Structure formats: C-alpha cells, structure tokens
Amino acid sequence: METLRSGWLTQGPQVGAFEQALAAYGGADHAIALSNGTAALHAACMALGLGTKGLGGTNGLGAKESDPDDRRDIVWTSPISFVASANCARYCGADIDFVDIDPSTRLMSIEKLKQKLQLAAQQNRLPKILIPVHYAGLPCDMPAIAALAAQYNFHVIEDAAHAIGSRYGESRVGDCRYSDMVIYSFHPVKTMTTGEGGAVLTNSQTLSDRIRQFITHGITRDAQKLENNADEPWYYEQQLLGVNYRLSDLHATLGLSQLKRVNEFIEKRRQLFERYHEILADLPLTLPREQALTQSAWHLFAVALQGDQDIPQKRRRVFDFLRQHNIGVNVHYIPIHLQPDFKRLGFSVGDFPMSEDYYQRTMSLPLFPDLTFEEQDYIADKLREALT
C-alpha cells in the first residue's frame, strides 16, 4: 500500500532496495532486477557480447567484431531444463548445443562436458558461454566447471532459476565465486516470487553496467558517458539497441517481502524432501538425492520410475491416475533438443540419450511450503496404489 501511494509504480526506490537485498542475500557485489528469468538469461548473454561474429555487424553491445572466423558464437547448456536456458543464445544470434546429464544427479555431466570440450578444441569450436542448470535446486559441480572454464577460456552463467538459497560447500548459489553471473527466477512456482520477475547477480561492475543499459532501451543519462556534448537537463542518449526488461516497484515490493521469508520457505521444502524419502523408500522409484558438499533449496521433487519394460506407458498410467485423484503431478522437462523448433536446427532423438531416458521415466510430485504432512501421505498412498 505504501508503494501504491508513493507515486512510484515503476523506476522508483523499491527496485533499488530489492536489488540491494538480493545482492546481500546471494553474496554478490551487484544484483540487477528484471522482468523475468528469461530476460535475465538474455541480458546476461548480451552483456558478455554473445552474437554473430565476422558478419560485418556488431555484437549485442555495439562493439565491432574483429574475429575473422565467419562462424557464430556458441552456447552450451543442459537438455533437461525449460527452453529459456537455450533460447537466450538464439535471441543473440548465437548457436546452441547441449551437454548430456549425469543420470545420478540429473545435472550436466562433468565427464561428458570434458569429452565435448576436448573434441570442440580440436575442431576450433569451443563455446563462448556455458550455462549449467541447477536443476530442481541441486547445484552443479561448480568448482569443476570453473576449472574447465579457465582451461578452455569460456564464460559461465549459472541458471539458478530453481536454486535461490542453495549452497555448494561454503559458496551460496548467487555469489558468483565460480561464474561470471548467476540468474534467478521469481515466477510464482519458484521458491520465492515477485509475481513475475528475475535477476542477474555478478561481481563485475562492467557487466552490471552493461545489463542496466541494455534493459532500459540502451539509454543512458550519465553525463560522463554521453557521446554528444549536451547540458540540457532532459537529455538522454540511446547508445545501443536495448529492450525494456525493467521490474516494477510493485513487483519489487513483493520481492522484498518474500525475500524476508525465503529461508523459511527453503527449510519447509527441505523438511518435506526428507519426509518424501521416508514415505517413498519402499517404492520402485529413483528419488532425488543431495550430493556431496551441496545443500539444495529443492524447488522440485522429481522421481524416476525404475525398470526397463514399457516405461513411457507406465509413466503415463501413473501420471493419469494421480491427476484423476487431484494430485498435481507434472513432468520437468521435455528435453529441449526434442522440441520441434530445435529439431529444425538439426537435433534429433538419440543425441543426448541420458536426458531422453530420464525424461521417459520422470514426474514431479507436489512440493511447496504449505503442503501438509496429511497431503503428503495421501500423495504417497495414491502413488503406491498406482505402482502396484
């Protein structure tokens, strides 16, 4: 109500307050609030100059490309994610490719990544950016990824849409200890929400400045950055082709309120996660598990059916049975490379077999802070009934 009465519905003080609180929570020097997580991914890629090289144009920030190689920049990410993790590369005119998952973690396989990097180095086709996805809230092996980034000279953007509040060792996902940038999503189904919203966290002043200009139409009013000599108080310049990805003060105010409760939300999710393990232990399911050194915020509780016979048909029967009993199961995710729009880029069935096998088996059970133990028991009972 204070925001509604303040006269600032957008571009006001609440956005800055939210950004400061986010930076402090994530442990980064800078946080930039945006309209959604997809915008955060796009802006992060643009800030790193991702784009088409050697085509007589410019990258996304107006810097002339001098690389004589006529091929486009490339981004690698995981097939098991929402399509935004890959689309951000295509928005910038870059190519996209994927690294298969480790079935034990559902995260990008470090071994597959190493093998792919070795081959790409031989072909002079290394990625400019790697986007590891902290699927379900479980952090990827970021120290290993950071070591490979240093060896092969690529940038890292952590897709932490599921992972605000997660930790890897002493590092909180958001402190950018192992990456150039981390992105959050504040969609209503995420651990905390601003209604719609997202953020980029970084320790780089340069990247922060680039993102801020890009998400406000490429415009600056900073007198020290103006290209023309002008002292009119109304003067501004569009210095690059930007977009409007701003977050409103109304959304930021909700975000500030939610951020005060995010640890409470995560604690309840982790409690429900442990309880799922207790009540589902006897079922023929592969359950998600925390890895060494990690502490996950557990955005999802995705189970995988075991066995080798008729798995897709069995998963569909179980899925339909649970939905019929008012249990909101879902599937996260259809592998990105199997989407028709990506098949037209040349991807096909069989390209990433671990991701495809996981997709055939998986479904996500309800997991949210207000889920009661009684509701959780009901889910377990109906799942047991569906599997027998």
Image (spheres, rainbow, N blue to C red):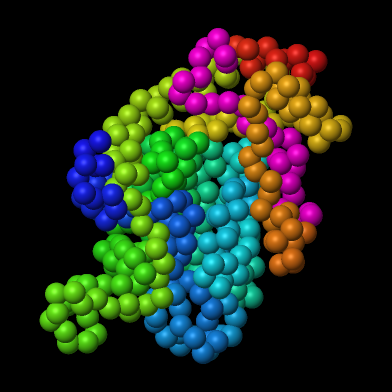
At 78% across and 54% down in the image, what residue appears?
350
Whether 382 is among the magenta residues is: no
Whether 375 is among the magenta residues is: yes
Q: In the rendered image, which quarter is residue 265 located in?
A: top left
Quadrant for the C terminus, please.
top right
In the picture, measured across the screen, residue 330 lies left or right of residue 138, that is: right
Whole-percent x, y for residue 373 in the image: 52, 12
Q: Which residues are magenta?
A: 349-376
At 41% across and 75% down in the image, what residue appears?
241
Quadrant for the N terminus, please.
top left
In this view, the residue farthest toward the right is 309
Whether residue 68 appears in this view of the structure is yes
Relative to 127, say whether 1 is above or below: above
In the picture, measured across the screen, residue 341 lies left or right of residue 166, that is: right
Whole-percent x, y for residue 106 in the image: 61, 41
In the picture, measured across the screen, residue 85 lies left or right of residue 261, that is: right
Whole-percent x, y for residue 377 in the image: 60, 11
Whole-percent x, y for residue 78 in the image: 60, 52
At 43% across and 56% down in the image, what residue appears?
40
Q: Nearer the viewer, residue 249 or 97?
A: 249
Whether residue 291 appears in this view of the structure is no
Q: In the rendered image, which quarter is residue 118 located in?
A: bottom right
